[in-house]
Image (cartoon, rainbow, N blue to C red):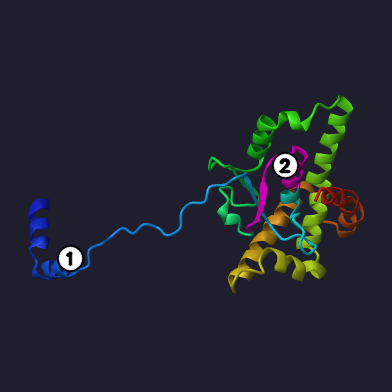
Amino acid sequence: MSNQTWRNTINNNPIQQSIRQFLAKFPLKTHRSPYGVRELDDPRLYIWGPGWKSGQETSFDQECVKWQTFLKFSKSDFETKRSNEPLMSPSGKLPFLILTTGDVLVDDSIEKHVTDMYSDNLGRINEQQEADSQSFIALADTKLRNALLYNLWCEPANESITYKKYVGHYAKPLDKLLFQKYKKLAVKELLTRKPVLNKEEVNIIDLFCIYVTWPILLLIY
């Protein structure tokens, strides 16, 4: 039986015709959405939030704070939005920046955009200042991040706090599944820098960086 003959047999089937006639009484119509797309006045940075203190715009997440600080120092025009949903991001993690053009930027593309658009605001610094700046960034990305990851995800005493901040808004059992997923990712990242996770080493050396650098970052807000 040819394809055309097979189709004709199906189309001429009484049951098929009855179904088609019934559905014809309910034609599909396209209705205009009552909600229009809101154009952004300024770029919007989606972050984990709120912060550790009530009403604080600064995120509790180190990676989000890093980019908030960078945008603030560059005097960029931007607004923050508490998302707490990393799957909204193309990279699957927060933060991400949406421009007024609709473009979505993550990680290094945020830095490139700010450098291209606000290079004058960043100012010219000498070699010593540049070296100090790079050292501070490296400190935030290594020692500070190590300390936060360990104390948030590997310290049993802080488990309830971490749970509330990162997955407390999800329904059960999704909250538990995501908590374990994020914890595994945090431990995996730590092990790439430290082959053995030593509590005393992290708490004494890395945790010191929290009390030195974190207040500096919070002062900008």
Q: Secondary structure at mark 2?
A: helix
What residue range appears in magenta? 66-83
Residue 71: numbered disc: 2
Image position of 182 (left or right of 7): right
Quarter holding residue 154 = bottom right
Which residue is found at the position 12% from the left and 56% from the top? 7
> Hey, what amino acid is under mark 1?
Ala
Q: From what the image shows, is residue 48 above or below residue 108?
A: below
Tell me which residue sits at (61%, 67%) in the image: 177
- Percent across and percent down for residue 99 are 58, 42
Question: For mark 1, does the 10 Å Cα neighbourhood hold few (<14), some (14 to 19), or many (20 or more) residues?
Answer: few
Instruction: State the separation of the CA atoms marked 1 and 2.
Output: 56 Å
Residue 68 among magenta residues: yes
In the displayed image of the protein, which residue is found farthest to the bottom? 172
Image point (18%, 68%), residue name: 25
Where does residue 73 sit, x and y in percent of width and height? Answer: 78, 40
- Residue 45 seen in render: yes
Q: Is 50 situated left or right of 219 in this image?
A: left
Q: Secondary structure at mark 1?
A: helix
- Picture coordinates of residue 34 (x, y %)? 42, 60
**Disc number placed over residue 24 in the picture, else none:** 1
Front residue (pair 92, 129): 129
The circle on residue 213 is none
- The quadrant in which residue 211 appears is bottom right
Q: In the rendered structure, which amino acid carries the disc numbered 2?
A: Leu
Q: Position of residue 4 (x, y in %)?
A: 9, 52
- Does residue 2 appear in this view? no
The image shows residue 1, relative to residue 134, as above or below, that is: below
Say which quadrant the N terminus sits in: bottom left
Q: Is residue 1 left or right of residue 113?
A: left
Is the residue marked by circle 2 packed among few (<14), some (14-19), or many (20+) residues within 10 Å? many
